[in-house]
Image: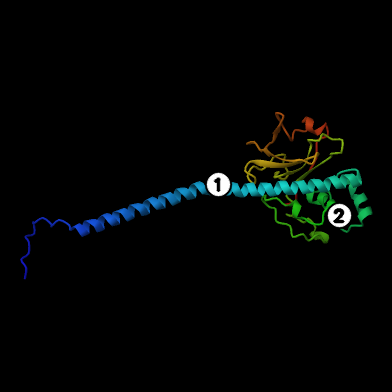
Amino acid sequence: MLPQPPPDAPAPPPSEAALLSQKKWEWLWGVGIVSIIIFALAGLTTQPMVIRSRKKSHQTEAVSNARQIGLALFEFENEYDNYPDFTTIAKVRQKSGTALSLDTKFSNDFFRQLLAADFTQGEKMFYAKIPGALKADDNIDGAEALKKSECAFTYFMGATARSNPGRPLVVTPMIPGTDRFDPKPFDGKAIILKLDNSVTSMNIDKAGHIIIDGRNLMDPKHPIWDGHPPIIAWPEL
């Protein structure tokens, strides 16, 4: 039996192999911690970018759909000498023989005149990624045509071909029942289709308003309305 060292004897120094093993594990541990931190920071920085990218794609989709609505409205006005409103319902029914419900409460109702008059054969262009809106199923039979949640655009009635070319016709995302816009869906932007058939994205301020020429767009006295403020038809969501 080998003699045992006394209890108070100093521990022998670690071998070179033990020191190398210890340094290896310390290095691996450090690399692991640094990697975790890097990945965590990367996740924090890329997440807002991903969200902004998604909102940008949703905004692009809304702009494209607004343009398609504008073309249909332009063709409708050429055919009926007016944009869809209360006065065009009887004309559309008589000329098209439609069985669709042409009500007068929501933008869905007035846009349904475009379907009845055959200026569009589908519902998808009325979609935008806003709260409460669903992708349309393109079923335009009877009560299925532009039913609740299948339209995301607010419609401003009262325009004529002689109105201010910059007058808005269709906008999104507007908060139903109010004159304010929701900044969340499109990263602080509102999509506006104008009478000249141009589509623009405009900033929404903290109060939910759009300011044009130093004044709230929805001010009935704004010169853009030519003294005839719009009758607002919000979507049925």
Report the front residue among 194 and 14.
14
Residue 234 in sight from this viewpoint: no
* Residue designated by label 1: 49
Look at 80% across and 45% down and name the residue there.
Answer: 70
Looking at the image, which residue sits at the far top?
Answer: 214
Whether pointer 2 and pointer 1 mark residues with C-beta atoms closer than 8 Å, the reply is no
Looking at the image, which residue sits at the far bottom?
Answer: 1
Q: Amino acid at mark 2?
A: Asp
Q: Amino acid at mark 1?
A: Met
- Distance between the alpha carbons at the discs numbered 2 and 1: 41 Å
Q: Quadrant of residue 229?
A: top right
**Rendered position, 179 above or below 214:** below
**Rendered position, 4 above or below 189:** below
Picture mark count:
2
Please give the label number shown on residue 118.
2
Disc 2 crowd, CA 10 A, few/some/many (<14, 14-19, 20+):
some
Question: Along the polypeptide, which appears first: circle 2 or circle 1?
Answer: 1
Look at 63% across and 45% down and name the residue there.
Answer: 184
Asked whether, in this view, residue 59 is left or right of residue 35, the answer is right
Q: Position of residue 108 (x, y in %)?
A: 79, 51
Please give the label number shown on residue 192.
none
Residue 197 in sight from this viewpoint: yes
Q: Quadrant of residue 101?
A: bottom right
Q: Position of residue 213 (x, y in %)?
A: 72, 29
